[in-house]
Amino acid sequence: MRLLPTIDGPDAAFWQGLRRRQVRVQRCHACGAHRFPATACCAQCRSGERDWVAVAPVGVIETWCVFHRAYFDGLPVPYVVIQVRLDCGVRLYSNPTGVEAHGLRIGMPVEGVFEDVTPDVTLLKFKPRKDA
Amino acid sequence: MIGADCAIAGVGHTTYGKLPEVDAYALGLWALKDALGDAGLGFEDIDGLIVNRIPDYQRFCEIAGINPAYVNITPGQGRFSGICIQTATALIRSGIATTVALVYGNNGRSAGDRYGGAADTYGSGGAGDWFAYGMTSPGAFHALMLRRHIELYGTTPDQLGTIAKTFRDHATLNPSAVMRAPFTLADYHASRWICEPLHLLDYCLINDGGVALIVTSAERARDCRHPPVYVRGYGMATTLAGSTFPPDDFWRGSMRTACARSFEMADVSHADISSLMIYDNFTPTVLFSLEGNGYCGEGESGAFVAEGHLALGARYPTNTSGGHLSESYMQGWALNLEAALQVRGACDGRQVKDCAFVHYMAAAPVVSSIVYGRDPS
């Protein structure tokens, strides 16, 4: 059984968003900075005022690595982990789809792919953007 | 400038390896007894104590039978060796303590510690958010950084392999090293991937062991058994905001700050440094450290190490003990011990000639730079 994220914790709005094919992150009311995972105050301006907003599920690949040693049941190796910076500024770790490790490059434009892994949990993965 | 006012007066360590019969407390006590004997001091001389990776300071003092005026306990992260050494000098300088014992005990190998998986708390502890994607472990974090370094600067596997091989060559001269069989670059390339682009031989060695350092005033150190190892300069800086992800600058900014502060305090330049001790949890950390501490230019560290500068007999003999990669992963402590032994001239077959200054550096979200000197000024 693979390890699944806690979908009913502080990031519930994010996980509910993925079910609806939306990427939702926190936005600071005071300075407009986006952030994820959820925190009580903005690390840019320290305001506690915030809400959850939908952002464009597009960004670029910043770097990647290939796991050859297994750390989790249900995740067969090798698998690729990518670091993505969304256009809204939020960084995420994820997995690529539709591209092998040797096809990746820094700055490659990517867009979100919503992958339902259980009836409740959807993960956000990324594929290369054809239009960019 | 004024002379250094603090020094390492005693160093001690256990054997390293698989020591299932002793726990972290016993490892720490073993190292502490060794360090006090080395200094010619007794348990009653300790009036400051900072323990690292040992689970509880009170239990440790109970076992050791000591009542130091000042105690502290620090998390089991390697960045804390540099922090503790700098804190010890501050305690001495401020008059809070006169003789500080820094005691490290790690039974990670026998306890089956794994750096990665569901118990992973590397960095800020936010790792759990990413387990579903398989992201875990400090090794993967450094693999991500190395991939960027490769893509930006053309760093090659041969350059990484040279670091691992050089430190292994040094370990063959160190009876305390766990891994002493030399290997070739071909062996390096053939070693299995753990988290690509990192091979097994790019990873440090999880082992059991303990290290203790006795830090005291320069004046008191001069009355101890061995010549003092002066703490000539030090600096720290952090990159903690946003540190769930690798830093864009490979920690160069904070390393520049820490290095400049330590060099100014020690009144030295790179030309004065005899030997380097670089926190080598993974081979790429050595690259980042050389760039951040100004031994080569930005992006030039791969070529720099391939030129052979880190080997014994070359310009900057580095991790002469074998370091974390080949001696044992004692989280910076054994590297600082090796720095002290080099300054004393006590390293036998791996001794750096005319070793006047050793520079310890650690690249991490908290960076440290410490300059040890043979002379007080």
Image: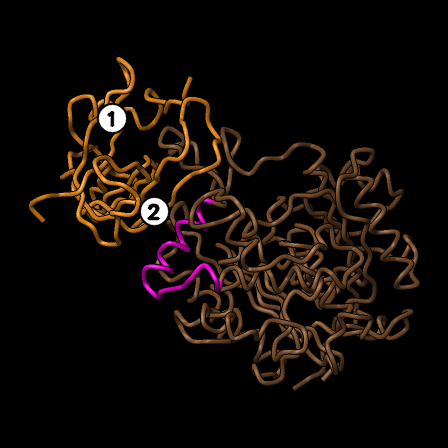
Chain colours: A orange, B brown
Determine the residue positioned at 39% across, 72% down. Answer: B298
Reading the chain from its start, which is encountered first: label 1 or label 2?
1
Kind of residue sitting beneath label 2: Trp
Q: Which secondary structure, mark 1?
A: helix
Determine the residue positioned at 51% across, 69% down. Answer: B290
Callout 1 crowding tier (Cα within 10 Å): few <14, some 14–19, many ≥20: some
Determine the residue positioned at 15% across, 26% down. Answer: A21
Residue B305 position, x and y percent, is 52, 70
Q: Which secondary structure, mark 2?
A: strand
Q: Are marks 1 and 2 on the same chain?
A: yes
Residue A35 horizontal side relative to residue A6, left or right:
left
Give the magenta range. B140-159
Kind of residue sitting beneath label 1: Ala
Most foreground residue, B245 or B184: B184
Residue B227, by quadrant, is bottom right
Residue bearing mark 1: A13
Chain for mark 1? A
Q: Is residue B153 magenta?
A: yes
User: What number is the disc on residue A64?
Assistant: 2
Chain for mark 2? A
Residue B216 horizontal side relative to residue B163, left or right:
right
User: What number is the disc on residue B78?
Assistant: none
Above or below, comparing residue A48 to residue B219 in the picture: above
